[in-house]
Image (tube, grey):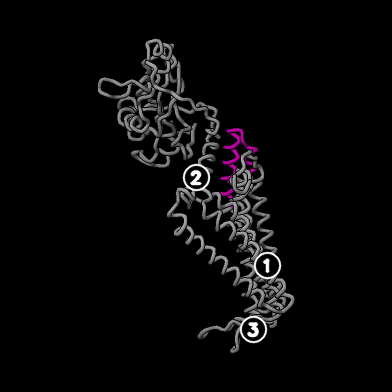
Amino acid sequence: MPTRLAVALAALVLFVALPALAELYTEWLWFGEVEYQSVFLKSLAMRWLLGAAAFALAFLVLYGNLRLAVKRARRPYVVFAGGGDLQPIVLERRHLAWLALGASGLAALFIGGVASSQWLLVLQYLEATPFGQADPLIGRDAAFYIFTLPFLDFVRLGLFAVVVLAAVGGAAAYVVSGEIAVQPDGIQVGEQARRHLLMLGAAVFLLFAWAAYLDMPRLLTTPAGIVHGASYVDVAVRLPVLRILMAVSVFAAGACVYGAFAGSTWPVAAVTGVYLFVWIGGGGTATALQRLVVTPDEQQKEAPYIAHNIAATRTAFDLDVVEERQVSGDALLTMDDIENNAETINNVRLWDHQPLLDTFGQIQEIRTYYEFASVDNDRYVVDGEYRQTMLSSREINSDSLPNRSWVNERLQYTHGFGVALGPVNQVTEEGLPVLFIQDLPPTSQTDLAVDQPSIYFGELSNDYVLVNTNTDEFHYPQGDDNVSTRYDGAGGV
């Protein structure tokens, strides 16, 4: 048995741990290449810390509740009857304790993994900076809605999941152990089970109160109204309803605590009924108000909130301090105006990016495995004149290789080559773009030249390639032959 266990552990390390460590190491090398290893370490540390903290919290809560339920079991053992020829399974109380330990560990491991994936959200919350712009309804800084509210939602949902799992697991343990039983006259719940589950119910209602509290500022982010943000119905109905729900939830939590120690559960049922009444009634009132009051006079009712939306949009795009001037249009354009603005007029862009991208693909891709991913604008001094240009890099698309072998994709076809570059406002007699730089290898019609035409890092470069191996790299086609090269750059890992 020890030998088999050792082999199983070795296989686990070989097939799970080693690939994970290899990926971690390559990430470390990449971040080091771009001189951001501190960012990598910070993100990695946050992943582990967040996952470990979530695992520890979830495990302590889940196992503590399950262990408490098992310890209070009335029966010293539990029998699971077998069907047909199957023998019944008998579990002693200590077996149930081990089962609770394993179930809690697995659930906590899952919760920790989910939590660790939210490392960026937590870092954004910890590094949040105020925007200096408060909303007009609640008065919170805009940074709250971008950084703080998502983080608080993450914490609330995590706690809610743990508490609900603890309640479900505890109830199941009490059923198995006999503390909760179905009798002919109804469901019989032992005092310990009732007290335990009511305390968990109090925690659930407190989380409901927190949810209502967070839903109030969330009204300012909803896209459901005529504009993005709070609407007339949100302010008139939903906001007061959320405040009432928050108060009722706190009372419900108190009723659960009272019921746990006083032995009476009718206050819990009463407050729960009030909660449902407010929740359902609030939704119905909001719908009725929208249809009967707002929709017939929507422009008037929503006018203040439309104004808030416009003001926030202008502030976001830094358009709230625009100076307005009246231009009559009566002034005539003179030759002096043209001469004084010759550089601007000579650089007015006529080409559109998408049609130009399609044209570059038709006349300059040259081989099927090349592709122009996008067209960009840039400015260069061309023959002594400052010109606005449009250009696109000729990249390798490994999906279009005639033979998609591992050697071709990873060792030979490693990089694109050259660019297509031309002015923004010139065309040939055939209606095609004038090109300052074109073809393979790149040729220039001006003093503008490409010093390093090889493109190893581009918009299509999402997979790894291996360079300086025993296989020469494809550089560019030349007639019926291919020119080869070796990587001599400093980039890469």
Q: Residue at x 44, y 59 (%)?
A: 291
Write down the residue under mark 1.
251
- Where residue 122 sits: x, y (%)? 63, 48
Which numbered disc, 1 or 2, marks the residue that appears first in the sequence?
1
Q: Please count the marks in the image.
A: 3
Which SS type dominates the magenta stretch?
helix
Question: How busy is the neighbourhood of tag 2: few (under 14 within 10 Å), some, or many (20 plus)?
Answer: many
What kind of element bears circle 2?
Answer: helix
Report the front residue among 3 and 99.
99
The stretch in magenta equals: 17-44
Q: Is residue 359 above or below residue 113?
A: above
Task: Say which of marks 1 and 3 sits in front.
Answer: 1
Which numbered disc, 1 or 3, marks the residue that appears first in the sequence?
3
Q: Name which residue type carries label 2.
A: Ile
Write down the residue under mark 3.
188
Which numbered disc, 2 or 3, marks the residue that appears first in the sequence?
3
Report the front residue among 28 and 334.
334
Residue 306 marker: 2
